[in-house]
Image: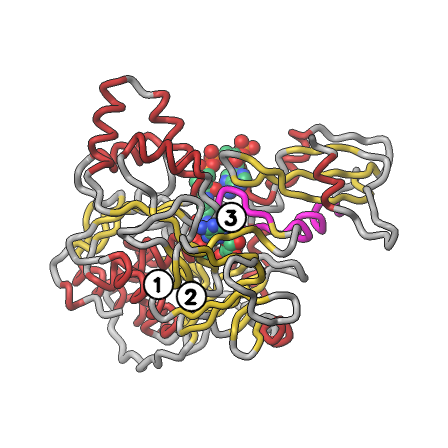
């Protein structure tokens, strides 16, 4: 990504104020020089726990200029949950700011990595000769949950990331005059590529308030300074809720501000039509819904001028899609099947998992595991092929990963995790469990035990104790029957 071409334009606005593209570029060079001095070589995996903002960006571009590979981590997740990505990708360096240094040291200990304080090394203003980095080189690893084993590292190259950004620039008309506010975390494609990297490829401005807060977000939307907003359905549903709670004067001010944006996008999980309709009443915007995946970036999206509620539109430029039945044969229009995707945006491989990589492609087409249908109004997503993949608040979690952790709880002999439909969260994680003795932890006990070991989205909200888990004649737990335990 060429930052210097945008010179004095503002790249980022964070808690410390505005930073221009040329200052960000200088900071990235200083980080790159420091990383090279600290032993980073092309292909080395460098994790970051910098908070969203200028230091996170300087760290990211600094890593890329050394030929290193970025592993973005969410600093609020428990270290126990971050251990696997760090050890699996053999992290050699961890980037932090003074605020996250303690955490960085704890995480770096998993692999004996070196800790680099980005803020400190930018101040040193070191310079170094930088390697030329090929577009096919690995750029970023994002861990994603699946139905087999531990989360897998999705490896994107500079080329696949650039293709994702270019498709969104073309489809959504990004330009240097745009400004977006980033309320999403920076360890997923949505916050990383759609909200952060894409605007930076055209010289637009990214505001990083450091997370989602409904009132603060409404104030930014009402400011008249923001032109684009993107979020998961849960965020829109929270914004609707706080609008409904506001007084008439505030409602009018917020609505007028939101109406002035040029584009509002929803994705990462199905947008309930009720939320779309409420948002339209409040802001005048028909949310543009699109469908993506960590392995692909954005694959399908509604158009600027044609947005069909309950549908996810048509393929992005450069993306080919097919829908096939169980034998791999293309289905007729209007019939449902598994969505397959091909194109330059598609990831390179699952890190250290050649078998999983091979299994997820057929003849060069990536198997999404999502069931879709092509209608005259565009594609529709009908759900996941696997019941064990749950989407909660836009976060994909694997029931099997959660079960594995809760089976280590001293009171639990066995357990089964399911997703329950929920208007605000899309799905909520729930767990049926069998006691190992007489100890019966409360839901609160289970939640706090879970939060020490798992990311927030993975910790079940509801628990039910049973004598036995429902099983089919083969002995396999029947998740439909587990779900019924909660109704
Ligand atoms: C927080 N909690 C959650 C979640 N987040 N529980 C279930 N699912 C979650 N996702 C828990 C907290 O621990 C807390 O529990 C309670 O819910 C309320 O937390 P709160 O502070 O209100 O939540 P928050 O921190 O405001 O988070 C809500 C959120 C967040 C903003 C919706 O989950 C989020 O940023 N989600 C988006 C994730 C994302 O970017 N996904 C994109 C991946 P307690 O009350 O017990 O303390 S998909 C992707 O990238 C593809 C490519 C695509 O298509 O986009
Ligand atoms: P992730 O693996 O976390 O990147 O999540 C990708 C998954 O989110 C996809 O495979 C879909 O199941 C789901 N998803 C993303 N966007 C949408 C959408 N607009 N509607 C329904 N599901 C979606």
Task: Give the labeled residue for mark 3.
Answer: 395
* Residue 487 visible, this angle: yes
At 57% across and 73% down in the image, what residue appears?
361
Residue 200 location (% of width, % of height): 25, 60
The magenta stretch spans which residues?
Answer: 390-408
Name the mark on residue 309: none
Of badges 3 and 2, the one in the foreground is: 3
Picture layout, residue 1 above or below residue 227: below
Of badges 1 and 3, the one in the foreground is: 3
SS at circle 1 = helix
At 34% across and 43% down in the image, what residue appears?
287
* Residue 187 visible, this angle: no
Task: Give the labeled residue for mark 2.
Answer: 70
In the foreground, 484 or 9: 484
Tag 2 near tag 1, CB within 8 Å: yes
- Is the N terminus in the top left, top right, bottom left or bottom right quadrant? bottom left
In the foreground, 464 or 359: 359
Indicate the quadrant where residue 445 lies.
top right
Task: Give the labeled residue for mark 1.
Answer: 60
Tag 2: Cα neighbours inside 10 Å, few (<14), some, or many (≥20)? many
Residue 141 location (% of width, % of height): 47, 65
SS at circle 3 = strand
Separation of residues labelled 2 and 1 (CA atoms): 7 Å
Q: Residue furthest left?
A: 8
At 27% across and 65% down in the image, what residue appears?
28
Indicate the quadrant where residue 133 lies.
bottom left
């Amino acid at each position: 990504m060429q930052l210097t071409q945008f010179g004095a334009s503002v790249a980022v606005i964070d808690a410390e104020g505005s930073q221009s593209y040329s200052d960000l570029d200088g900071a990235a060079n200083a980080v790159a020089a420091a990383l090279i001095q600290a032993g980073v070589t092309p292909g080395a995996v460098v994790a970051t726990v910098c908070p969203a903002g200028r230091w996170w960006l300087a760290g990211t571009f600094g890593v890329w200029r050394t030929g290193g590979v970025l592993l973005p981590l969410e600093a609020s997740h428990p270290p126990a949950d971050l251990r696997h990505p760090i050890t699996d990708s053999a992290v050699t360096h961890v980037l932090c700011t003074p605020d996250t240094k303690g955490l960085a040291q704890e995480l770096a200990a998993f692999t004996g990595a070196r800790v680099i304080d980005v803020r400190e090394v930018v101040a040193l203003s070191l310079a170094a000769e930088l390697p030329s980095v090929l577009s096919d080189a690995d750029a970023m690893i994002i861990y994603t949950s699946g139905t087999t084993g531990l989360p897998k590292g999705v490896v994107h190259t500079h080329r696949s990331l650039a293709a994702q950004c270019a498709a969104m620039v073309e489809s959504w008309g990004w330009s240097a005059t745009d400004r977006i506010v980033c309320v999403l975390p920076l360890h997923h494609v949505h916050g990383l590529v759609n909200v952060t990297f894409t605007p930076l490829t055209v010289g637009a401005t990214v505001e990083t308030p450091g997370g989602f807060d409904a009132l603060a977000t409404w104030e930014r939307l009402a400011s008249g300074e923001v032109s684009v907003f993107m979020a998961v359905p849960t965020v829109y549903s929270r914004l609707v809720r706080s609008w409904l709670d506001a007084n008439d004067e505030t409602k009018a001010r917020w609505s007028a501000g939101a109406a002035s944006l040029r584009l509002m996008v929803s994705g990462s999980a199905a947008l309930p039509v009720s939320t779309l309709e409420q948002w339209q009443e409040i802001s005048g915007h028909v949310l543009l819904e699109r469908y993506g995946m960590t392995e692909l970036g954005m694959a399908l999206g509604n158009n600027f001028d044609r947005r069909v509620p309950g549908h996810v539109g048509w393929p992005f430029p450069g993306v080919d899609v097919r829908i096939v039945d169980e034998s791999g044969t293309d289905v007729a229009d209007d019939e449902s099947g598994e969505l397959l995707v091909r194109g330059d945006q598609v990831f390179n491989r699952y890190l250290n998992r050649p078998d999983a990589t091979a299994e997820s492609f057929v003849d060069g087409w990536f198997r999404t595991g999502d069931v879709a249908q092509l209608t005259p109004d565009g594609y529709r997503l009908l759900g996941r092929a696997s019941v064990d993949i749950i989407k909660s608040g836009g976060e994909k979690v694997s029931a099997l990963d959660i079960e594995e952790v809760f089976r280590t709880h001293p009171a639990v002999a066995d357990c089964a995790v399911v997703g329950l439909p929920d208007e605000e969260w899309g799905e909520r994680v729930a767990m049926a469990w069998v006691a190992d003795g007489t100890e019966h932890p409360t839901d609160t006990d289970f939640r706090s035990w879970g939060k020490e070991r798992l990311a927030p989205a993975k910790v079940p909200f509801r628990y039910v104790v049973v004598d036995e888990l429902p099983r089919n004649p083969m002995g396999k737990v029947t998740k439909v029957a587990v779900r019924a335990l909660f109704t």
